[in-house]
Image (spheres, rainbow, N blue to C red):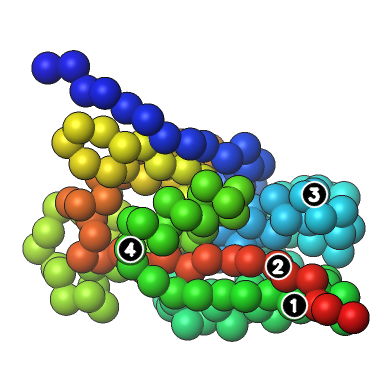
Amino acid sequence: MTIGRTGKKLDLEPYTQWAPGVRSSASACGPATMAAIAEYWGRRLGLSALIGLERFRSKAEQINHVYDRYGGKLWGMSARGLVKGIGAYFRSALGDTSTIQLRSFNDFALYKAEIDADRPVAVKFDKWLSLRWTGNYAFDYHWTVGIGYELTEVGPRLIVQDNGARRADGGYTASRERLIDYTENRAVITMVSVKPVRKET
């Protein structure tokens, strides 16, 4: 069967939580997600305070900075923790000229609207706290960066950067794009939209 597809994908710099130099790699998916989204907006808005590749010696150093300053925890980052952390991170960079609008949701139409508006989305998978322990989901407990979508005849798919993975031999796989069936994973997903807005003067 041929599957027809339409969709959209944003161009974001990938961040890898398992890269050399990242401390607490196993719980750095939230900070890696925040760093990738901040890098995107920093370049789009011309805000050097958000452009980690200009402020830090490496992506690992930027992830560590976000982890230490904006809510990284050894047990991972909750959706509420990411909202609080990324809000503080952006407010420190935006100053008095702009504010940041954040919203948590789980709705493909809203996700699609964010991507269509050129706004990447933080996407969390959590089968533990959603009490879906036995399902076969893309991830058990993990933050990713939502960068796009595909609309197919068999249902919508998310395009995410997965923040990398640790291999059994101790090495790592760099962050890569993954296609995620939204319908199959919907029960364990939380999405966080990030929208910088200029204040009226």
Q: Say if residue 68 shows up in the picture.
A: no
Q: CA distance from mark 4 to mark 2?
A: 21 Å
Left or right of residue 107: residue 176: right
Q: CA distance from mark 2 to mark 1?
A: 6 Å
Badge 3 marks a residue whose secondary structure is: helix
Badge 2 marks a residue whose secondary structure is: strand
Instruction: Read off the residue under disc 1.
Output: 99
* Circle on res. 196: 2
Instruction: Read off the residue under disc 4.
Output: 107
151 or 51, which lies in front? 151
Amino acid type of the residue that numbered disc 4 sits on in the rendered structure: Asp
Whether residue 23 is situated above or below residue 154 in the rendered picture: below
Q: State the image coordinates of residue 173 (x, y, percent, origin top left).
A: 48, 37
Amino acid type of the residue that numbered disc 1 sits on in the rendered structure: Thr
User: Reading the chain from its start, which is encountered first: label 4 or label 2?
Assistant: 4
Task: Count up the numbered dots.
Answer: 4
Whether residue 184 is situated above or below residue 153 in the rendered picture: below
User: Reading the chain from its start, which is encountered first: label 2 or label 1?
Assistant: 1
* Circle on res. 43: 3
Amino acid type of the residue that numbered disc 3 sits on in the rendered structure: Arg
Q: CA distance from mark 4 to mark 3?
A: 28 Å
Tell us which disc is closer to us: 1 or 3: 1
The answer to which image quadrant residue 62 occupies is: bottom right
The answer to which image quadrant residue 119 occupies is: bottom right
The answer to which image quadrant residue 31 occupies is: bottom right
Badge 4 marks a residue whose secondary structure is: loop
Tell us which disc is closer to us: 4 or 3: 4
